[in-house]
Amino acid sequence: MNELSIKIKIGNREYPMKVKAEDELVLRQAGKKINEKIKSYQDQFGIDDFQDLLAMTTIDCFVEKLQSVEIRQNTDEVALDQVSKLNKLISSEI
């Protein structure tokens, strides 16, 4: 397994990490997105307390994740229902 030692900067701190080489880009993108959300909340609400900014960013990220999971589940259910209907049509023609 090929591991890299990287540092991800979140807000005003750097976090050293050991990651798989194939995960590096995703982790760096995640760090960038987190910093963008922190900056957005800071600008939008004038909040300087870093713990508050991190909490708001965490809530925002998890809401997005949960909504994404729900959408995917609904899409999967619709797709399975359509496949089932197609199978029934095919079976009735055979």
Image (cartoon, helix red, strand yellow):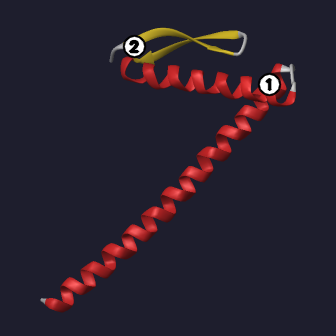
Q: Secondary structure at mark 2?
A: strand
Tag 1–tag 2 contact (CB < 8 Å): no
Give the side of residue 88 with respect to residue 8, left or right.
left
Residue 79: quarter of image:
bottom left
**Residue 27 screen position, x and y as percent:** 51, 23
Query: Which residue shows up at 50% across the image and 60% down it?
Result: 73
Image quadrant containing the N terminus: top left
**Residue 39 screen position, x and y as percent:** 73, 23
Of residues 17 and 70, which is closer to you in this image?
A: 70
Residue that numbered label 2 is attached to: 3
**Residue 47 screen position, x and y as percent:** 87, 24
Query: Which residue shows up at 36% across the image and 22% down it?
Result: 22
Give the side of residue 11 with respect to residue 82, left or right.
right
Residue that numbered label 1 is attached to: 43
Residue 2: quarter of image:
top left
Labels 1 and 2: the sequence-earlier one: 2
Image quadrant containing the C terminus: bottom left
Please count the marks in the image.
2
The 10 Å Cα crowd at callout 2, few under 14, some 14 to 19, many 20 or more, is few
Q: Secondary structure at mark 1?
A: helix
The 10 Å Cα crowd at callout 1, few under 14, some 14 to 19, many 20 or more, is few
**Residue 30 screen position, x and y as percent:** 55, 26
Query: Which residue shows up at 53% across the image and 58% down it?
Result: 71
Q: Amino acid at mark 2?
A: Glu
Q: Amino acid at mark 1?
A: Asp
Residue 15: quarter of image:
top right
